[in-house]
Image (spheres, rainbow, N blue to C red):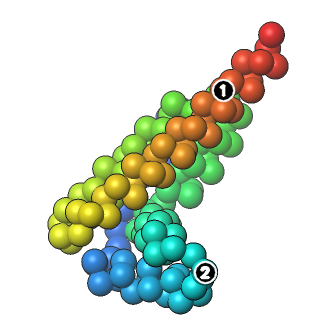
């Protein structure tokens, strides 16, 4: 990672109520989907609206190197803050949404690394 890397920051005024309002809106817009879909979507809305995750990852990937491990450190940091949010807002049953996202992102990184290694053979 370059020394000029943007630092991952969180700010905002999300509450459990905000989370459920966003989840309900997503559920209303997607009535054919299970409720878990709306919670996962609300998690991503929280990430988008309370952090600079997109800016950090955009800069990280602009370096043009294999940054999978650095990316996963950023993902892990987001997950940690989400778990803290869930604990503070007394919605611990939704903390596992971070685990789902983490596992998805880890699988993407592993797949990318495997494809890259296969090309080098």
- Distance of label 1 from label 2 (alpha carbons): 35 Å
> Which residue corresponds to mark 2?
32
Residue 34 at x, y percent in the picture: 51, 73
Q: Foreground mark, 1 or 2?
A: 2
Please tell me which residue is depicted at 56% across the width and 58% down the height of the picture.
54
Eyeballing the image, is 46 above or below 74? below
Eyeballing the image, is 36 above or below 68? below
Q: In the image, is 92 to the left or to the right of 70?
A: left
Q: In the image, is 115 to the left or to the right of 29?
A: right
Q: Residues within 10 Å of mark 2 (few under 14, many from 20)?
A: few
Q: Residues within 10 Å of mark 1 (few under 14, many from 20)?
A: some
Provide the secondary structure element on which disc 2 rests. loop
Please tell me which residue is depicted at 46% across the width and 46% down the height of the picture.
102
Provide the secondary structure element on which disc 1 rests. helix
Eyeballing the image, is 90 above or below 95? below
Residue 62 at x, y percent in the picture: 68, 42
Task: Please say whether residue 49 is visible from this viewpoint.
Answer: no
Res 83 label: none
Residue 105 at x, y percent in the picture: 54, 44
**Picture quadrant where residue 76 is located:** top left
Task: Please say whether residue 114 is visible from this viewpoint.
Answer: yes
Figure disc tally: 2
> Which residue corresponds to mark 1?
113
Is the C-beta separation of discs 1 and 2 under 8 Å? no
Please tell me which residue is depicted at 45% across the width and 51% down the height of the picture.
100
Please tell me which residue is depicted at 74% across the width and 24% down the height of the picture.
116
Residue nearest the viewer, comparing 84 with 50:
84
Which mark is first along the chain, 2 or 1? 2
Residue 57 at x, y percent in the picture: 57, 49
Quadrant the C terminus occupies: top right
**Picture quadrant where residue 117 is located:** top right
């Amino acid at each position: 990672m370059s020394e000029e890397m943007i630092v991952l920051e969180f700010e905002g005024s999300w509450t459990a109520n905000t989370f459920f309002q966003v989840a309900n809106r997503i559920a209303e817009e997607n009535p054919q989907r299970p409720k878990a879909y709306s919670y996962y979507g609300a998690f991503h809305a929280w990430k988008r609206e309370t952090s600079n995750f997109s800016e950090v990852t955009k800069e990280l990937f602009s370096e043009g190197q294999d940054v999978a491990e650095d990316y996963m450190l950023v993902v892990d940091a987001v997950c940690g803050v989400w778990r803290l949010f869930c604990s503070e807002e007394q919605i611990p049953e939704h903390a596992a949404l971070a685990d789902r996202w983490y596992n998805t992102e880890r699988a993407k990184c592993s797949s990318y690394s495997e494809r890259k290694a296969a090309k080098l053979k």
